[in-house]
Amino acid sequence: MLLRMKKSLLLGLTVLLGACEITPTDGSSVVTPAMAATERDTPELRGMSFAQNRCADCHAVERLHSSPVPAAPSFEAVANVPGVTRESLTQWLKTSHDYPREMYFEIPAERIDDLVAYMLTLRSDDYEPSIGLAPDASKPAGSAGSLGGMTTAAR
């Protein structure tokens, strides 16, 4: 009898917790543990996983974090550069990204769309850039070596 009650209580708590949802107040999207458990194969989650495993040594890959390497912009800063689109970010990651020579790393072509999908989840209408990533007004958005006006060096 006691074992049956414990099982019922555990099942009830599991159902109750499964119904909980985190809703951000800024209108942005949040990847919750429940989403991760049920939607493991979305581009956004694949991109987040890739970023955490391959990019986080240099870049902040989550909202409201500072990059471990000061010269490496946070993914949130890149996603919030004025004028950045899915297309311009995709092109930038393919051709104009400033890969440091000591990194010996290229983003595999099959991962770029996932990474872009994840980075775009970091956009926020009330984003405030931190010091260190200032748009370069001398370069128009979409020009070679720029991403929405943010200067980059060619590979």
Image: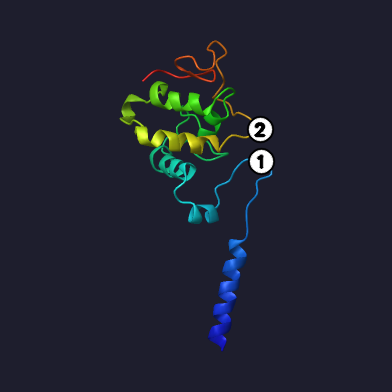
Q: Residue at x 60, y 64 (%)?
A: 17
What type is the residue that disc 2 sits on? Asp
* Residue 42 position in % (x across, y down): 47, 45
Q: Residue at x 36, y 25 (%)?
A: 100
Q: Quadrant of the C terminus?
A: top left
The number of discs equals 2
* Residue 91 position in % (x across, y down): 44, 24
Q: For residue 11, what is the image quadrant?
A: bottom right
Q: Residue at x 54, y 20 (%)?
A: 148
- For this orientation, the residue located farthest to the top is 138
Give the labeled residue for mark 1.
Answer: 27
Q: Is residue 152 left or right of residue 122?
A: left
Identify which residue, 129 or 131, lies in the foreground.
129
* Residue 22 position in % (x across, y down): 63, 52
Residue 125, disc: 2
Identify which residue, 24 or 73, lies in the foreground.
24
Eyeballing the image, is 106 above or below 50?
above
What type is the residue that disc 1 sits on? Gly
Tag 2–tag 1 contact (CB < 8 Å) = yes
Q: For residue 110, what is the image quadrant?
A: top left
Eyeballing the image, is 112 above or below 39?
above
